[in-house]
Amino acid sequence: MQQVKLGKYKHFKGGLYEVIAIGKDCETLKDIVIYKALYEPEEFPMGQVWTRLLEDFVSQKDINGIKVARFKFIEPLK
């Protein structure tokens, strides 16, 4: 399993998030990342909690032929 540190991350689209826990999906037992938004867009309230499969969280996106991390680690949880 690839490690994800608790702390702040920047999404490749620019939003900031805070990983608050790593868990397991109760149906598949796959690792999931539990994180919250550190900004407030119109679509959801500040601090909205999200989950994503760990394998997707650590994946890369192809932006104009350049591979970039979907989420880039910024700083550890305080």
Image (spheres, rainbow, N blue to C red):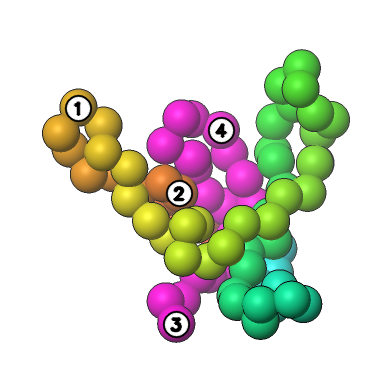
Q: Name the quarter where the N terminus is drawn.
A: bottom left
Q: What amino acid is at disc 4?
A: Gly
- Magenta span of residues: 1-19
Residue 74 shows in this picture: no
Residue of label 4: 15
Residue of label 3: 1
Image marks 4 and 3: residues in contact by CB distance under 8 Å: no
Q: Does dot 4 land on a helix, a strand or a loop?
A: loop
Q: Position of residue 14 (x, y in %)?
A: 48, 30
- Which mark's residue is nearer the viewer, 1 or 2? 1
> How many C-alpha atoms fall within 10 Å of the one at disc 1: few (<14), some, or many (≥20)?
few
Question: What residue is shown at x 70% (from left), y 41% (from top)?
Answer: 37
Nearer to me, 58 or 18: 58
> Which of disc 1 and disc 4 is earlier in sequence?
4
Between the residue at mark 4 and the residue at mark 3, the CA separation in whole angstroms equals: 25 Å
Image disc number at residue 71: 2
> How many C-alpha atoms fall within 10 Å of the one at disc 4: few (<14), some, or many (≥20)?
some
> Which of disc 2 and disc 4 is earlier in sequence?
4
Q: Per the image, is 25 magenta?
A: no
> How many C-alpha atoms fall within 10 Å of the one at disc 2: few (<14), some, or many (≥20)?
many
